[in-house]
Image (cartoon, rainbow, N blue to C red):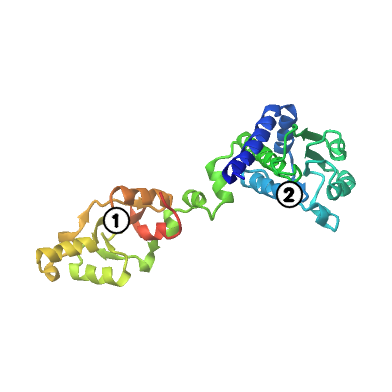
Amino acid sequence: MDIIQEGKKVFEIEIDALNKTKDIIGESFSAIVEAITSCEGKIIVTGMGKPGHVSRKIAATLASLGTPAFYLHPAEAMHGDLGMITSKDIVFAISYSGESNEILNILPNIKLIGSKLIALTGNENSTLAKAADIFDVFPKFKEACILGLAPTSSTTVALCYGDAIAVVASKIYDFQDLNYSRFHPAGTLGKKLIIKVSDLMTKEDNNAIVYENSTLKEAIIELSKKGLGIVTVIDKNHHLLGVITDGDLRRQLEKGVDIYNLFVYDVMTKLPKTTAMGLLAVEALKTMKEFNMSCLPVLNGDEICGTIRLQDIIGIGIIL
């Protein structure tokens, strides 16, 4: 047996099934999407066995792209989980045969509750299709299993069909990356779109600040005490005048100057790059990367309110 060729054959069979299904997408698909996007409740996706695993993933994709949805195990539904369904919901049942006992057993109760039933099946004459308010039917294709029995092509097609519904629905909602970030706060994109400079900056007593008439010695003490790698020089109104970094201090030492007889205005970098507390942290990161900096003073209007460091941003998983 040529293992590589056998593996490729599985791909070919399942790709063929996907192409056949794509070619028959039509009014039923449109009706399903319209029903889902106008639903006042939630979409409850159900399936048994391998289609059940696919149903769980479809529900997760719908939810992440703006359609409230969850997976309902049809067997558990018979033992009280039907209470999760309301008359405003839509039940989306997936069964290639359309005769899965676990799904058929809950159909009368779905009707009693008053939920709309959508079915995805491979048999238009099946009990499930006949009970559904809207249904779509897979075209004829081969399962990739050598016996033609194990759900392989059919589950791949169902998964892609569910993705198509979720993506098209999200376009109808005009689902934007900000919406996506609300549902994915732990992901990299979510963090980029939610976390602001003010969420990460060092502020108040932990911030390293000296006044314009301070000596360089006082700045060094503040720099060492706070450990930020930067000390901000301000006037009496807390307006930014300049900054002194670890690098500035090293350069003064290399020159051999008497650092104890200098004042901060002799050494500080005037008009430094800054960021605003209301900006997204990723914008501050872009500035640091562009100018090869490790930290930035943070402004609230014209006043200094904190310091944000490169390591603070990267440390929570925000990267460019």
Between 72 and 203, the one lying in front of the other is 72
Judge from the rendering whether residue 96 lies leftward or rightward of residue 313; answer left or right: right
Most foreground residue, 253 or 263: 253
Residue at x 53% of width, y 43% of height: 177
Residue identifier under label 1: 239
Mark 2 Cα-neighbour bin, 10 Å: few <14, some 14–19, many ≥20: some
The residue beneath circle 2 is 50
Residue 212 position in % (x across, y down): 22, 62
Can the viewer see residue 309 in this picture?
Answer: no
Circle number at residue 118: none
For the N terminus, give its image quadrant: top right
Q: In the rendered structure, which amino acid carries the disc numbered 2? A: Lys
320 or 209, which is in the foreground?
320
Q: Image check: 124 left or right of 208?
A: right
Secondary structure found at label 2: helix
Q: Earlier in the sequence, mark 1 or mark 2?
A: 2
Relative horizontal placement of residue 219, taking residue 121 as reference (left or right): left
Picture residue at 75% right of the left edge, 30% below the top: 28
Q: Quadrant of residue 308?
A: bottom left
Residue at the image position 59 percent from the left and 50 percent from the top: 183
The x and y percentages for residue 72 are 76, 52
Number of on-image labels: 2
Q: CA distance from mark 1 to mark 2?
A: 64 Å
**Which residue is outermost to the front?**
1
